[in-house]
Amino acid sequence: MDARKRISKWIVAGVYLFLISLVLWPLIDLLTNVWPPQLGTLQWRYGFMGLMAAFLNTPILALILAMAFAFVMQHRRVLRAIAILELLGALALLLVILTFALDVVQMRGTMQPEQLGAFQAGALIAELKHLVAFAVLSLLGVGTWKSSGHRRTDGKKDEAVGVVIGSG
């Protein structure tokens, strides 16, 4: 018997719920740390994007685990949804990378000389974390999308993909 058929739907629901919480809770924690938003304030933007760098790994790990679980369970629609989330996340991080770099340049001008070394090191580390997360999400998004194709287990493409609405 196929192992996927023996796994209870309760287990599947529990795994996906846990993985969703691994994505959402760090995002909620980040937002509660920087609330209320002050997009027009340089210091707030710099702090938000710098702090965001520390919150990226757990949601990415959750997406990887969800992707692996969906792949094993052959949940193609879930794989497509994960791919879209990964690509949207990569796009958002690209905007963060560009905006953060500009904010760092502006913030640098406000730093005291004795603070400059620590500031530049922190900004560089945060930007590197953003860049790595962008690369990971981009690669995962494209790979997950390609891996979610409607293929049979023997490697051949399915003849008909979709829902049959009647037999005529």
Image (tube, grey):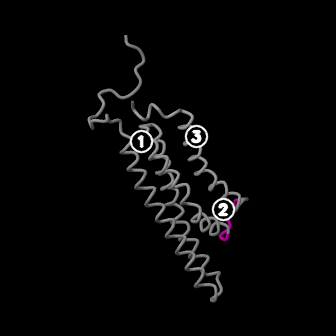
Callout 3 environment at 10 Å: few (<14), some (14 to 19), or many (20+)? few
Numbered mark located on residue 39 in the image: 2
User: Relative to residue 16, is residue 110 drawn left or right?
Assistant: right
Residue 138, image x, y percentages: 43, 56
Task: Kindly report the distance in space between the C-alpha atoms of the residues bearing marks 1 and 3.
Answer: 16 Å
Q: Write the residue at 61% across / 81% down.
A: 109
Residue identified by numbered label 3: 14
What residue would you read off at disc 1?
Answer: 72
Quarter residue 121 falls in = bottom right
Q: Is residue 40 magenta?
A: yes
SS at circle 1:
helix
Q: Residue at x 70, y 62 (%)?
A: 33
**Range shown magenta:** 37-43
Residue 46 placement (x, y as % from top left): 62, 69
**Neighbours of disc 2 within 10 Å: few (<14), some (14-19), many (20+):** few
Residue 14, placed above or below residue 141: above
Asked if residue 27 lies in the magenta stretch, the reply is no
Q: Nearer the viewer, mark 2 or mark 3?
A: 3
Residue at the limit of the structure toward the bottom, as seen here: 114
Q: What residue is shown at x 49% (from left), y 70% (from top)?
A: 128
Q: Is residue 73 rendered to the left or right of residue 96?
A: left
From the viewer's side, name the closer residue of 45 and 35. 35
Q: Are marks 1 and 3 in contact (CB under 8 Å)?
A: no
Secondary structure of the residue carrying tag 3 is: helix
Q: In front here: 77 or 105?
A: 77
Tally the numbered discs.
3
Measured along the vertical axis of the image, is residue 137 above or below residue 160? below
Secondary structure under the numbered disc 2 in the rendered image: loop
Upstream in sequence: badge 2 or badge 1: 2
Residue 156: x, y in percent?
26, 35
Camera-nearest residue between 124 and 144: 144
Q: Which residue does the image show at 60% across and 80% down from the upper left?
A: 119
